[in-house]
Image (tube, helix red, strand yellow):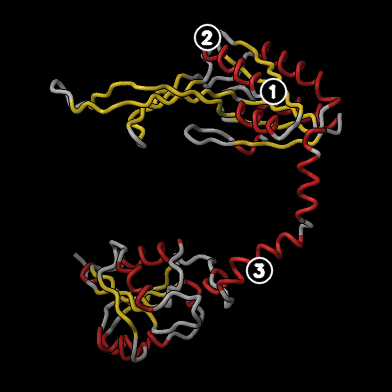
Amino acid sequence: MSHRDLATVFVSGNFFILHPGHIRFLRFASECGSRLIVGVHNTQPNANYPTPAERLETLKSLDFVDEVLLIENGLESTLRALRPEVVVKGKEYESTQNIESEIIGDWQGTLIFSSGESSYSASDLLSATSPADIIWVRPQSYLRRHGVTLDRSRSLIASFDRLKVVVVGDLIVDEYVNCEALGMSREDPTVVVSPQKTDRFLGGAGIVAAHAAGLGAETHFVSLTGVDEPAAWANEKLVSYHVKPHLFADQSRPTSLKKRYRVGSKTMLRVSHLRQHEVRSQIASQMCEETEAILPTADVLIFADFNYGCLPQSVVDRLIHSGKACHTFIAADSQSSSQLGNIAKL
């Protein structure tokens, strides 16, 4: 075991906002010895900044920090009282004069520079303005810059019923099975529940289309389903929301169904009936042809991709080309929440 492994390490700073750069910096410092002490300067520029006591409490919550103290009588006095074997500072101080080096030299201490700091700035995050400025003035300034007014918003909303919207993407059916908990099984460590009520909702790209229709737009929805009961339910539900469905059945997949078993407000189990392979080229071509037949009179084309195979890159590229040719506004709702995906493809 080296001398450094047994060393006391000291770092100091304001730590007004504990950001990711601080975490990397402090974690690096903790690995430079066996005990990490963090000194917090006793300063508070204005009421928007956390108090020294609040900053001490925050730093104490880090499991790799052994001790936190307030620097009340200056840094030199604190260093001479602690006599740490190692002092760690950020990389940005390497080319500057550091009084710590002279002080800890009296007991052969070591000054180490870490690259763990980042470009976050507490002064940017906590500007010297009043809370009222942050809560009210700044949002108002944003609205003024972008020409957002109540009258203009009302006018835009009133114009929704003159729009024709095409949504292309992954249909998902969300099902919630609300259960009563009966207890633990005597045979194995399993929670036993009794289903009481089942609720179904449109999800994925389906609810995007439903929202567009709810705002008054003539809405067409192009998607994939399996050949099953959830597909029939989804078609009926879309029609009830005044959406015009263009659903293409693919026998190689089920309709994407996410079933959640819940007790009270807690989900105990989720079962996902889905396939993530790309749609077959023949069906993809049919989907594109159906969409392209609508685009010449459409105002908006929305891609809603949840990475379940409805929107391979070939379909996206073809429809973007077709949409641009028709001067259709194109938007995307792309995500990969519980599966691998590429949100950049849209």
Residue 137's label in the rendered image is 3
Please tell me how crowded label 1 is: few (under 14), some (14-19), or many (20+) other residues with Cα within 10 Å.
Answer: some
Residue 141 spot, x, y in % from top left: 71, 65
User: Which three-letter amino acid code belongs to the residue tagged 1?
Assistant: His
* Quarter of the image where one finds residue 30: bottom left
Q: Residue at x 29, y 90 (%)?
A: 106
* Quarter of the image where one finds residue 165: top right
Residue 299 spot, x, y in % from top left: 81, 32
Residue 110's label in the rendered image is none
Residue 242's label in the rendered image is 1
Q: Residue at x 28, y 89 (%)?
A: 80
Q: Nearer the viewer, residue 181 or 258?
A: 181
User: Which three-letter amino acid code belongs to the residue tagged 3?
Assistant: Val
Please tell me how crowded label 2 is: few (under 14), some (14-19), or many (20+) other residues with Cα within 10 Å.
Answer: few
Q: Secondary structure under badge 2?
A: loop
Residue 191 spot, x, y in % from top left: 23, 27
Q: Nearer the viewer, residue 193 or 4?
A: 193
Q: Secondary structure under badge 1?
A: loop
Q: Residue at x 76, y 49 (%)?
A: 153
Q: Residue at x 72, y 59 (%)?
A: 143
Location of mark 2 (residue): 228
Instruction: Give me the C-alpha separation between circle 3 and circle 2.
Output: 54 Å
Please tell me how crowded label 3 is: few (under 14), some (14-19), or many (20+) other residues with Cα within 10 Å.
Answer: few
Above/below status of 242 relative to 47:
above
Instruction: Give me the C-alpha separation between circle 1 and circle 2.
Output: 22 Å
Q: Nearer the viewer, residue 244 or 337?
A: 244
Q: Earlier in the sequence, mark 3 or mark 2?
A: 3
Q: Can you name the residue that lies furthest to the left here?
A: 186
Quadrant containing the N terminus in the rendered view: bottom left
Residue 190 spot, x, y in % from top left: 21, 26
